[in-house]
Amino acid sequence: MPEVSYPEGSKLRLVGIKGDICLGGRLFVSAALRGEYVRFVEVDDGLDVILFDRLILAYYDRSERRIIRID
């Protein structure tokens, strides 16, 4: 599988061994992404999109510190 690269200066978080990331607390993203970096991009005031490469995984509400799933 090709290595994922992100633009320089991207806001990245490393997915932990349990599939979680640390953002003022532990938030589950995906166990399948253990050891990979995910990118956070601000899309609205207080709202970030969480990306793996170009794939949208979820949204992150910074004010409530919670992940908004895409189903």
Image (tube, rainbow, N blue to C red):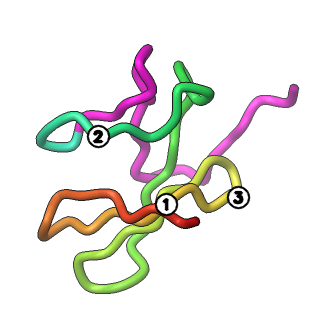
- The relative height of residue 60 versus residue 17 in the rendered view (above or below) is below
- The relative height of residue 17 versus residue 4 in the rendered view (above or below) is above
Tag 1 residue: 58
Identify which residue, 45 or 68, lies in the foreground: 68
Lateral position of residue 61 relative to residue 20, left or right: left
Residue found at the far bottom of this picture? 44
Front: mark 2 or 3 = 2
Q: Secondary structure at mark 2?
A: strand
Estimate the x, y position of residue 22 in percent, counting from the top left. 25, 34
Mark 1: amino acid: Ala
Distance from label 1 to label 3 (Cα)?
12 Å
Q: Secondary structure at mark 1?
A: strand
Label placed on residue 23: none
Write down the quadrant of residue 1 in the picture.
top right
Mark 3: amino acid: Arg
Distance from label 2 to label 3 (Cα)?
21 Å
The quarter in which the C terminus is drawn is bottom right
Estimate the x, y position of residue 39 in percent, counting from the top left. 49, 51
Tag 3 residue: 54
- The relative height of residue 19 versus residue 46 in the rendered view (above or below) is above
Write down the quadrant of residue 45 in the picture.
bottom left
* Circles 1, 3 touching at the beta carbon (< 8 Å): no
Distance from label 2 to label 1 (Cα)?
12 Å
Estimate the x, y position of residue 34 in percent, counting from the top left. 53, 21
Q: Residue at x 45, y 40 (%)?
A: 29
| Magenta stretch, overall SS | loop
Lateral position of residue 28 relative to residue 36, left or right: left
Q: Which residues fall within the magenta stretch?
A: 1-22
Tag 2 residue: 27
Identify which residue, 7 or 42, lies in the foreground: 42
Q: Residue at x 38, y 65 (%)?
A: 68
